Image: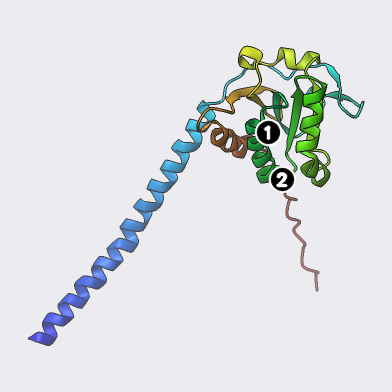
Amino acid sequence: MENQSGSNIKKIGQTLALLLFLVGLPLGSWYYLREGYNFRKALFDDLKNLGQTPAVGLVDARDSLIRLDEIADKVLILSELGSEDTLSMRLLHGVADQFGPSQAVVFALFGKDSTATLALQNYFREQSETYPDMFLFFSSGEEAIQALPLPQRNGRYAALADTAHTLRRVYDLHAEGEINRLVEHLTIVIPGKRTAKPILKRAAEK
């Protein structure tokens, strides 16, 4: 009797394990896929259409003529900063560390004056040397910064533009959680990697 009882318990355990595999795992996968979809949808819903990146030519700190609206296949982060705003610089530095290897993000940073522009260049110098095309430095007298939807025009804000040059959101860099939201938005607006189409080779006829 004891052997039979043990055998029944073993069969019940096997049945439960099989049910977990056939029912539990698919339900768990569905739940996590659903939560992932809802999370991405919430991120997309948080992005707006705030107009286009200003279509004007700008002279950067290296005396080069730049048109932000012609930067192809890149996401733009635009911000106006003062030389004393080390918090915003540090936060944007962290974002650049994360997305520099992707070569898909360009930072257009506007100093409030010549002193601030120089401070920005010095603060981001190492990253600029590692990723030469990742940073553009301007002075705030440029027309483009005046056209951006940055609240109150008092610095500490950053604007995100997608690869179609559409301004999608403004972030208060000093507000809790805003820099994390910028990082999350970057992960969904950066274009996916392009891979070559597979080439099918016919077997040689005998």
Above or below, 198 against 45 in this view is below
Task: Decide if residue 59 is on the left or right side of residue 202.
Answer: right
- The CA span between labels 2 and 1 is 20 Å
Judge the density around disc 1: few (<14), some (14-19), many (≥20) Cα neighbours within 10 Å.
Answer: many
Which image quarter is the N terminus in?
A: bottom left
- Tell me the element at label 1: helix
Q: Is residue 140 left or right of residue 77?
A: right
Quadrant assignment for the C terminus: bottom right
Q: Quadrant of residue 76?
A: top right
Name the residue: 68% across, 45% down. 97
Residue drawn at point x = 64 percent, y = 31 percent: 88
Q: Position of residue 140 (x, y in %)?
A: 77, 18
State which tag comes first along the sequence, 2 or 1.
1
Would you say 90 lies left or right of 26 here?
right
Q: For residue 80, which quarter of the picture?
A: top right
- Find disc 2 in the rendering and name its residue: 102
Label 2 SS: helix
- Circle 1: residue type: Met
Q: Residue furthest right?
A: 63
The correct choice, above or below, for 31 with respect to 7 in the image is above
Residue 5 percent coordinates (x, y):
11, 80
Task: Name the residue that disc number 1 marks.
Answer: 89
Q: Residues within 10 Å of mark 2 (few under 14, many from 20)?
A: few
Where residue 32 appears, x then y in whole percent? 41, 47
**How far from the left and from the top, in percent, is residue 6?**
15, 81
In front: label 2 or label 1: 1
Number of residue marks: 2
Residue in the image at 30% along x and 62% along y: 20
Which amino acid, mark 2?
Answer: Ser
Q: Is residue 71 visible?
A: no
Q: For residue 100, which quarter of the picture?
A: top right
Residue at the limit of the structure toward the left, as seen here: 1
